[in-house]
Each structure stands twice: as C-alpha cells, then as structure tokens.
Image: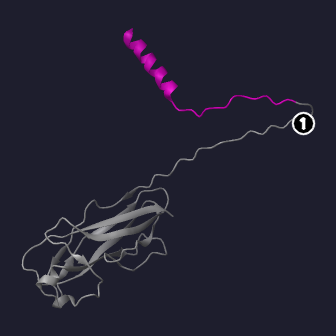
Amino acid sequence: MKKFLLSIVAVMLLLVSTAVPALADDTTTTGDGDVTATVPVEGTIEALTISVTHPATLAYTIDPNTGENGDFIAPVIPITNNTKVPVNVTVQSLASSAGGTLQFTDVAEDAKDWVNLNLADSKTYLALGIQIQSVFGWNPGFTIDTHYAVDVNSDFFGSLPANTMGELSLTANHGLAFDQSYTAMHTLVFMFNLV
C-alpha cells in the first residue's frame, strides 16, 4: 500500500513539475455588433546547439633524416559538423606555447633559409601552418590559403554542411640541425558558428 501511495505521489510531482507555458488571465471582450479583440502572442525560440567533432589533441614529427629537406609528418585533422545546419570553421589562433623541451618562435614560411639553419636557429624558428587538406565536404567559398602561426588574425576557412566532414592538415617549414630529440607545443583554437 505504501509503495502504491508513493508511486501516486511521484506521478503527481512529475505532472506538477512538467513545464507548461503560463497563460495570462482570461479577459472578456464585450460590445454591440462586431467586437474585435487583440491578443498578443509571445513565442520562445531556443538556440540551436552547435556540435562539431574534432581531435582533442594533435601531434607532428619533424624528421630531418628523411626526404630532401627533411619530413614534416602530421595526421589529417577531421572536422565533422554534427549540427542540423551548416557551420563556419575559423582558426582563431595557432601559436607556440610553453610545455615542450623547446619553445619555437613562430615566423613566416619564407622568413628563413630553412635547409641552411644552424643548430641554434633550427631549435628556435618554425613556420607552422594549418590548411584545408581536401576540397571534399566543404561548401563553395572555402579558402585554400594556409594560416601560419605567425599570423595573429583569425582566418575563416569555410563552412561545412550539416552532418558533413571536412579535412584540415598541418604544414611546416623547419630547420634540419637538431642534435637530439626535442618536443614542442603549439595551441590551436577553432571557432565554429552558424552560417
């Protein structure tokens, strides 16, 4: 019996707590002949949730021993728009940050004679950039330009349709004179907003 009463109380509480828009007090319109009444109608519009799936971390490798000018190896960066409408993809910043055994100074891709950098300069300078890897998935109007870490302005890359994946990738110009293995950190900040 107690369980029955508790379940009735629980159902009643659930019904009472269910949100129903409040109605204003009724009003009565009276008159002779045609009678008009103006009733304001108020609506509530909820914000659309933006949902974008992207990597939580990224990693790259500089291998000065392979390739003609060394190899910069980085994975493709998938960006998936899970939102019900298209979203814009902007890189707000890409910047060198503390946390590795080296902290690079970000420079332009043509700022140095990269293959001829000495040990000190190889450990100091990097031109790290991000770009669209493949045109597939992006709406028309995307940019093919590379955003380099030295650029302090945000760069709009393009928009992705609903439930679509686009790909970005890292690129870099770097020195070759490294005397041991090092680590370095950069911070990448995306901004996603509605088209």
Name the residue beneath numbered marker 1.
34
Q: Quadrant of residue 93?
A: bottom left
Which residue is at 92% across, 31% downward? 32
Q: Is residue 181 left or right of residue 156?
A: left
The x, y position of residue 63, in whole percent, is: 14, 79
The x, y position of residue 73, in whole percent, is: 21, 75
Give the residues in magenta. 1-30
Relative vertical location of residue 107 with respect to residue 12 in this rendering, above or below: below
Disc 1 residue type (three-letter): Asp
The x, y position of residue 170, in whole percent, is: 28, 74
Instruction: Identify the secondary structure beneath mark 1.
Output: loop
Which residue is at 42% across, 69% downward? 137
Name the outermost residue toward the right. Answer: 33
Q: Quadrant of residue 187?
A: bottom left
Q: Is residue 83 left or right of residue 54?
A: right
The x, y position of residue 183, in whole percent, is: 15, 70
Residue 69 belongs to magenta span: no
Name the outermost residue toward the top. Answer: 1
Relative vertical location of residue 28 with respect to residue 130 in this rendering, above or below: above
